[in-house]
Amino acid sequence: MGHETVGRIGAVGTGVDPERLGQRVVLKPILSCGTCEACRTGDINRCREGRLVGRDLAGGFAERFAVPATAAVPVPSELPDEVAVLTEPLANAEHVTERAVREGDVVFVIGSGPIGALMVRAAFLHRARQVIVTDTNPERLAFALAQGAEGVPGDDALEAVTAATDGWGADVVIDAAG
C-alpha cells in the first residue's frame, strides 16, 4: 500500500544529482530490472524481477522510504498535491483506454470507485460514444453519472447494458471493481 504518493526527496544516494534534494515528486511504482525481454519491449509490469512500491518495499504509508532516483518523477510546482497523487491511477486509466477504446465505442465499466471514475473520463477522452457504469455504491455511481456516464444496477448489469445499447452490448468492458 502507498504506491500512489507525492512527497519530497529527503536524501540522495551516490551518483544522484544533489540538486534533487527537496524536490517534490510522484512515483513510478513499478521498479523493473530494465534488461529482461518484458522490460526491453516496454511491458515493465511483466518483469519477473520487478518490485512494486508499497507491496515489495515500503511505500507512502511509511514516514520515509527509499526508491531508485529513476522512480521519482518531478511534479510541477503549480500542481497541487491532491491532483499530483492521482498521477499513477490516471496513467493506468490512460494506458487501458488508449489500448482498448476506439472512437465510437460503447464502454462498460464495472466499478465506479476512484479507478473506475478515471476510466470513465479516459474513455470519453478517447471518444467513446457511450460509457455505462455499474456499482453497488450509490454515491460512487452518482459521481460517475456526473462525469457523463450512464448507470446501470449491479444485479442486472448484463441485461441493462444490452437494453441501453439496443441489443448491441459493449465493445469494451473494463473491470475496475478491484
Image (spheres, rainbow, N blue to C red):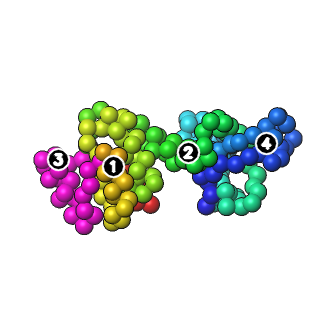
Q: Earlier in the sequence, mark 3 or mark 2?
A: 2
Q: Earlier in the sequence, mark 4 or mark 2?
A: 4
Judged by depth in the image, the label closer to the viewer, 4 or 3, is 4
Residue type (three-letter) at the residue carrying disc 4: Gly
**What residue is pinned by disc 2?**
83
Q: Is residue 97 left or right of residue 162?
A: right
Residue at horizontal 26%, vertical 50%? 150
Q: CA distance from mark 3 to mark 2?
A: 34 Å
Q: CA distance from mark 2 to mark 1?
A: 19 Å
Residue type (three-letter) at the residue carrying disc 1: Ala
Residue 139 position (above or below residue 45): below
Judged by depth in the image, the label closer to the viewer, 3 or 2, is 2
Q: Is residue 14 left or right of residue 2?
A: right
Q: In the displayed image of the protein, which residue is found farthest to the right?
A: 14
Measured as percent of width and height from the top left, residue 89 is found at 51, 48
Q: Secondary structure at mark 4?
A: loop
Q: Earlier in the sequence, mark 4 or mark 3?
A: 4
Nearest the camera: 130 or 98? 130
Q: CA distance from mark 3 to mark 1?
A: 20 Å
**What residue is pinned by disc 1?**
146
Please report the bounds of the magenta region as a residue range.
Answer: 149-170
Query: Which picture quadrant has residue 110?
Result: bottom left
Measured as percent of width and height from the top left, residue 134 is found at 30, 58
Nearest the camera: 143 or 58? 143
Q: Is residue 45 visible?
A: no
**What residue is pinned by disc 3?**
165
